[in-house]
Image: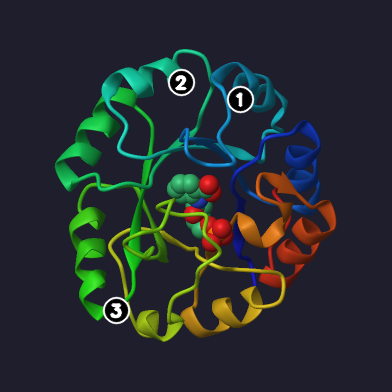
Amino acid sequence: MNVAVKICGLTRAEDLSAAAHAGARYGGLVFYARSPRNIAPAQAAALAAQAPAGLARVGLFVDPDDAALDGVLDRVPLDIVQLHGHETPARVAAIKARTGLPVMKAVGVAGPADLDALWDHGLVADMLLIDAKPAADAALPGGNGLAFDWRLLVGRRFLKPWMLAGGLTPDNVAEAVRLTGAQAVDVSSGVESAPGVKDAARIAAFVAAAGAAPAP
Ligand SMILES: O=C(O)c1ccccc1N[C@@H]1O[C@H](COP(=O)(O)O)[C@@H](O)[C@H]1O
């Protein structure tokens, strides 16, 4: 199976190298101050410059205003913008127009009613990211290592290509892919030794277990 893998929350050169070497197709850089994976634009620019051609650089934002977006995009070469907050479809469309980049919109899922938002966002976003819906009192809107009931996705079709996220690990990603038919998966905490510190062995195990094909 050819499953594309995104390793999110890269903060160190060795983590980016481990992701690329393992065969990941996307590397995520988190621009969200409350996250333990938050990265400053200057540091992100250096990391992004090291990314090989087969690794798409994804910038993760949470409800960014235009100044926040510009402050990163003026410095950091990104290939995709990931929106992981409460952005409306109209805001997604505006960010897509402003940045000129493909936009991946994350939608949190806890039950069947949450799937409706995937339809609405599928009308404007280029890609969808289906993540677990965080608890109301969660400190972060994502990156919590929290999974949702993957059976909610069985038999579902979406308007745009989508990634599965939320609590994925080297041990459960194969089952998640088998059950949902996901062709792309995203992981952050499941391949870490500590928040914000990726583990090369876990990255390699995750990519292998996902059934990823190496970048062409
Ligand atoms: O990783 C973070 O710190 C983060 C912060 C704010 C929003 C999203 C974040 N990460 C994204 O969350 C999902 C799932 O992460 P995990 O594998 O369950 O830890 C993933 O899409 C990350 O891109």
**Residue 143 left/right relative to 13:** left
Amino acid type at mark 1 = Ala
Amino acid type at mark 3 = Gly
Q: Position of residue 105 (x, y in %)?
A: 34, 49
Task: Please determine whether, in this image, residue 100 is positioned above or below residue 15.
Answer: above
Residue closest to the eye, 139 or 1: 139
The residue labelled by disc 1 is 44
* Label 3 element class: loop
Asked if the residues shown at circle 2 and circle 1 are in contact, with their CB atoms under 8 angstroms apart, the answer is yes
The residue labelled by disc 2 is 72
> Most extreme residue toward the front, as rendered?
137
Q: Earlier in the sequence, mark 2 or mark 1?
A: 1
The residue labelled by disc 3 is 111
> Most extreme residue toward the left, as rendered?
90
Q: Residue at x 55, y 68 (%)?
A: 167
Amino acid type at mark 2 = Val
Where's the N terminus, which quadrant? bottom right
Residue closest to the eye, 133 or 29: 133
Q: Residue at x 58, y 29 (%)?
A: 39
Mark 2 close to ligand 1, CB under 8 Å: no
Task: Please determine whether, in this image, residue 209 is positioned above or below residue 49.
Answer: below
Q: Earlier in the sequence, mark 3 or mark 1?
A: 1
Residue 185 visible in image: no
